[in-house]
Image (tube, rainbow, N blue to C red):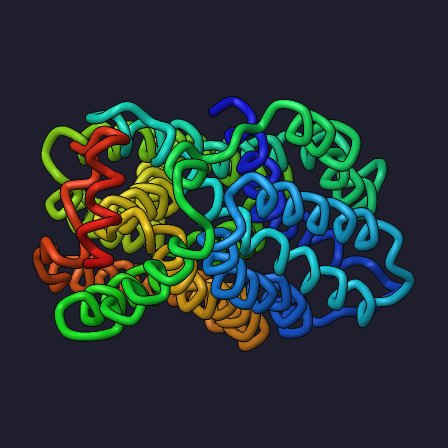
């Protein structure tokens, strides 16, 4: 859990670092980027994540969690270092795409590894504790931007993202274990079972669940990346200086940590079918409130709640998907649904960029984001109840009974 937490932390750092340097990129005269171009470059990483999530989510079900995590972490960290030294915006965008491909494979693999290593009854909570690293990484990016962005520039901020090459990668090679469920399986037979189970998941109720979870991921990731990319600039357009605007980003991600842990604990107790749509509805209300002028103290509270109900809800949603599908297609299902969701992540920076360039005001941005949150709530509500032939009450399974589910699915 500790290693996975810090791996996800750097994933979250990348999520926020681009948004934190947007004002600096706009002011960087050597590249002379427009808001629309910055939104487009921001979407390149999300395109890479889409490809990485779909491809690597399947690969990790075939070759194992450990090797996949280490490979993706190495690729992502090297690309972040390349971003820091990119000589022009074109290569910068290419390196952002490569970093995204590595990041896209990290999330489904780490979530599967965490879920499969957790004791019964704590799978959603353990997953939330690990994936709250997203928000902690985001807070780290916001704090470091407050300290270092103006004196050292955006290149230094991306160089920090390369630290896993000399820290986490060696530690993971030494200490990161393989998933217990994966170790126990015969590779050839496991591949056959996974492909058969994946084929069944593309039919009937399971296919409907995959499609609706994909829509919910689209909404959740659009909110997460859209707000984290453009919140500082939107707050500046509302009349706040750069420092306070970055503090809003910090508060947003502090709320995400609390929302992820509390929401996932409630999911273990009440069930994610109730908690996830309720959290999306809270996101709808809180984001809409950001479109009106509020007293500063109330504004901080609303941004905190918005972070808890957007980025925090995305983490709850990952746990919901992981416990909905059977172990032998868990990472694949997360990869497929989050891969489609990356289209929403791509849309977030793009929509924000075009709206900012159109100059229609910050209020319309928040109202559009609120409508997207409502879409996420509707999608999760419509997810059909799990079929016992394709999924199971995974959070109640022991490792021994989990093996039996895999065998029964194959049968």
- The residue at the point 40 percent across, 37 percent down is 184
What's the residue at 26%, 73% (across, down)? 202
Please tell me which residue lies in front, 137 or 296. 137
Please provide percent x and percent y for residue 100.
Answer: 62, 58
Q: In this rendering, is residue 208 above or below 319? A: below
Q: Reply above or below: 18 against 46.
A: above
- Please provide percent x and percent y for residue 372: 30, 64
Q: Which image quarter is the C terminus in? A: bottom left
Which percent across, then down, holds residue 26? 73, 61
At a point 62% along the width and 46% down the height, the residue shown is 14
Q: Above or below — where is 103 with respect to 161?
A: below
Task: Please state if 90 lies on the left or on the right of 217 as rendered.
Answer: right
Q: Is residue 298 visible?
A: no
Query: Height in image: 146 above or below 339?
Result: above
Residue at 71% from the left image edge and 51% from the top image edge: 75
- Residue 142 is left or right of residue 228, and the answer is right
Location of residue 74 (image quadrant): top right
The percent position of residue 111, horizontal first and vertical second, equals: 41, 41
Q: Is residue 388 found left or right of 92 in the rendered image?
A: left
């Amino acid at each position: 859990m500790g290693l996975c937490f810090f791996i996800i932390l750097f994933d979250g750092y990348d999520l926020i670092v681009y948004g934190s340097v947007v004002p600096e990129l706009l002011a960087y005269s050597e590249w002379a980027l427009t808001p629309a171009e910055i939104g487009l470059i921001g979407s390149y990483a999300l395109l890479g994540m889409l490809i990485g999530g779909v491809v690597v989510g399947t690969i990790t079900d075939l070759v194992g969690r450990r090797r996949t995590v280490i490979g993706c972490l190495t690729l992502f960290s090297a690309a972040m270092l390349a971003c820091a030294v990119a000589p022009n915006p074109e290569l910068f965008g290419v390196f952002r795409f490569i970093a995204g491909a590595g990041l896209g494979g990290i999330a489904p693999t780490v979530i599967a590894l965490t879920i499969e290593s957790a004791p019964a009854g704590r799978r959603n909570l353990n997953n939330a504790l690990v994936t709250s690293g997203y928000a902690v990484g985001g807070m780290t990016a916001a704090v470091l931007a407050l300290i270092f962005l103006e004196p050292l520039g955006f290149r230094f901020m991306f160089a920090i993202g390369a630290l896993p090459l000399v820290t986490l990668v060696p530690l993971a090679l030494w200490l990161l274990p393989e998933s217990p469920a994966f170790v126990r399986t015969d590779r050839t037979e496991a591949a056959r079972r996974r492909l058969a189970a994946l084929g069944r998941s593309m039919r009937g109720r399971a296919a409907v669940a995959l499609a609706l979870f994909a829509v919910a991921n689209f909404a959740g990731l659009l909110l997460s990346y859209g707000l984290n990319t453009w919140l500082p600039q939107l707050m500046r357009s509302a009349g706040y200086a750069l420092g306070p605007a970055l503090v809003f980003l910090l508060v947003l991600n502090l709320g995400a940590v609390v929302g992820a842990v509390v929401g996932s604990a409630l999911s273990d107790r009440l069930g994610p079918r109730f908690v996830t749509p309720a959290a999306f509805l809270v996101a709808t209300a809180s984001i809409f409130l950001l479109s009106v002028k509020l007293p500063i103290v109330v504004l901080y509270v609303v941004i905190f709640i918005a972070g808890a109900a957007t980025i925090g809800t995305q983490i709850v949603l990952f746990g919901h998907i992981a416990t909905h599908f059977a172990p032998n297609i868990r990472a694949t299902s997360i990869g497929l649904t989050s891969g489609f969701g990356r289209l929403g992540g791509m849309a977030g920076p793009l929509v924000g960029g075009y709206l900012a360039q159109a100059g229609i005001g910050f209020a319309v941005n928040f109202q559009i984001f609120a409508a997207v949150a409502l879409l996420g709530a509707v999608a999760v509500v419509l997810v059909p109840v799990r079929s016992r032939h394709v999924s199971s009450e995974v959070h109640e399974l022991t490792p021994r009974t989990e093996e039996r589910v895999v065998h029964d699915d194959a049968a």
